[in-house]
Image: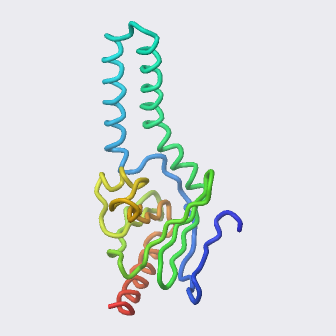
Amino acid sequence: MHEGQIDLLPGERVIWAGQPVRRPLFNPGDYFNVPVGLLWLGAVTVFFAANHDTAFHTAAWVVLTVAGVLHLAGRPLIRYLRLASTTYAVTDGRVIATSSLVRRKEESAALAGLADPVVTPGPGKTGTITFGRLGVLAWASANFGAGTGKDRKPPVILVGVSDVAKVREKLAKAVEEARNRNP
């Protein structure tokens, strides 16, 4: 299996396939993650500025500061790098996003259970497609997913899609047809 390959179920047919043409460094979830990261770094610095008497305090300050910096810079950077190897597909039954940075990761969702596709326009004819409107906290936790325990699934988000209006129309039609097949 090579990078970007989509695994289809028996009898499944592809309606649209593509990959991001734009890779934004930040997404709406960063409106939450960046302030939290800055507050974390500020709190760590203030606390350890007054408590740096021992080697343990200094080591703890270094570890917690590195964790804060990785939270601020690491998440957007990893997301940016992962988008370089991302492939999207919409079949007659699912929407699929496959990516690999260190290991292959596939996210999919049944079309019949999705909300209507919503476009967030980007530069030119590009944009991001979500299913229903996602709030800032949903974007912030997109890597962790929604739900609880082993049922936790991240939302499938199509980022940097070219000719986003046409793709959205194909998705809307596919979602509607899937709902009609599975009432």
Using the rendered view, name the quadrant where residue 156 is placed. bottom left
| Way the structure is coloured | rainbow
Q: Is residue 22 left or right of residue 33?
A: right
- Residue 120 lies, in percent from the top left, at 37, 62
Say which of 97 and 48 sits in front: 48
**Which residue corresponds to the image point at 53% horizontal and 49% vertical from the top-left?**
80
List x then y, in percent, for residue 169: 42, 79
**From the viewer's perspective, is 18 left or right of 155?**
right
Image quarter hosting the C terminus: bottom left
- Occupied quadrant, residue 180: bottom left
Query: Residue at horizontal 47%, vertical 60%?
Result: 159
Total count of labels: 0
Work out which quarter of the rendered image holds the N terminus and state it.
bottom right
Above or below, comparing residue 51 to residue 87 in the picture: above
Residue 115: percent from left, percent from top = 32, 74
**148 is higher (above) or lower (below) than 116:** above
Q: Residue at x 53, y 46 (%)?
A: 78
Q: Given the current orientation, which residue lies at the most extreme top position?
A: 53
Compared with 75, 58 (above or below) is above
Depth check: give the residue in front, 139 or 148.
148
Residue under the image location 36 percent in, 75 percent down? 114
Please, which residue is most extreme toward the right here? 2
Viewer-proximal residue among 129 and 10: 10
